[in-house]
Amino acid sequence: DAGVTQSPTHLIKTRGQHVTLRCSPISGHKSVSWYQQVLGQGPQFIFQYYEKEERGRGNFPDRFSARQFPNYSSELNVNALLLGDSALYLCASSLYAGQPQHFGDGTRLSIL
Amino acid sequence: RKEVEQDPGPFNVPEGATVAFNCTYSNSASQSFFWYRQDCRKEPKLLMSVYSSGNEDGRFTAQLNRASQYISLLIRDSKLSDSATYLCVVNKDDYKLSFGAGTTVTVRA
């Protein structure tokens, strides 16, 4: 069975641009979460979606938004990119909210 | 105060040694606990859940002390393949995982 898949794997953008990252959860998983991980730190929670509704939001500015589609896949959007947005963006899915989460390989975003 | 704090290490140990490390969490209402491992430039992978009574998975033993709000991981008979960063993870709500910054373990031949 396929695990969590994310696209693209790498992305280079410039300041001020916007980006859309995509995630497909493990088949049957209804909960998708997004995390940002900068070098030397643990992942930081951005959003969780469950059954297409936002269940939680971390301490990130409004430039970050997300949504979940009827097939439970998800997109993370970041507007007005800043240099500090350079990070590994991880998507994780779980069967239900509160269950152990399984991570995709991540999208490595570099802002120039 | 950070929600989850870990000793960053690194712990450098020879093959076959036992290594143990802790993490502390700040929110006493935390409900579930996990250890993840992360290899360099890879995604975190679930190592094990941590239960109140303590639990083992092969060479790995996890303990939870709710009164003192810490979690421990012990690795016995270390292998070269155990070299990784170990992330302590706490779930306060149903939706949000809070990660520590990780403890780096290097096992040398």
Image: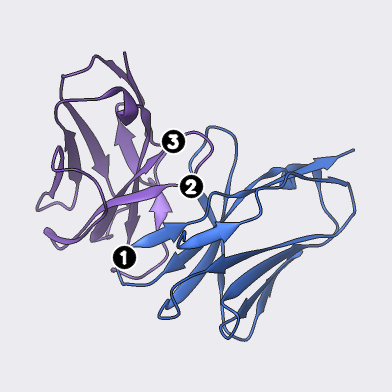
Q: Quadrant of residue A62?
A: top left
At horizontal 14% and vertical 30% (from top left) the residue drawn is A79
Which one is in front, A24 or B75? B75
* Residue beneath disc 2: A42
Mark 2: amino acid: Gly
Q: Is residue B5 visible in this depiction of the protein?
A: yes
- Residue B4 x %, y %: 50, 61
Assign the C terminus of chain B to one quadrant of the image.
Answer: top right
- Mark 1 — on which chain does it sit? A
Which type of secondary structure does the marked residue at label 2 adopt? loop
- Residue B101 x %, y %: 54, 49
> In the rendered view, would you say A5 is above or below B7?
above
* Residue beneath disc 1: A95
Task: Compare marks 1 and 3 and give the one earlier in the sequence.
Answer: 3
Which one is in front, A25 or A53? A53
Disc 1 to disc 2, C-alpha distance = 23 Å
Give the color of chain A as drawn: purple
- Residue A20 x %, y %: 18, 30
Give the color of chain B as drawn: blue
Mark 2 crowdedness (10 Å alpha carbons): few <14, some 14-19, many ≥20: many
Q: Is residue A100 left or right of residue B71?
A: left
* Residue beneath disc 3: A38
- Mark 2 — on which chain does it sit? A
Q: Nearer the viewer, mark 1 or mark 3?
A: 3
Q: Quadrant of residue A111?
A: top left
The disc at residue A27 is none
Mark 1: amino acid: Leu
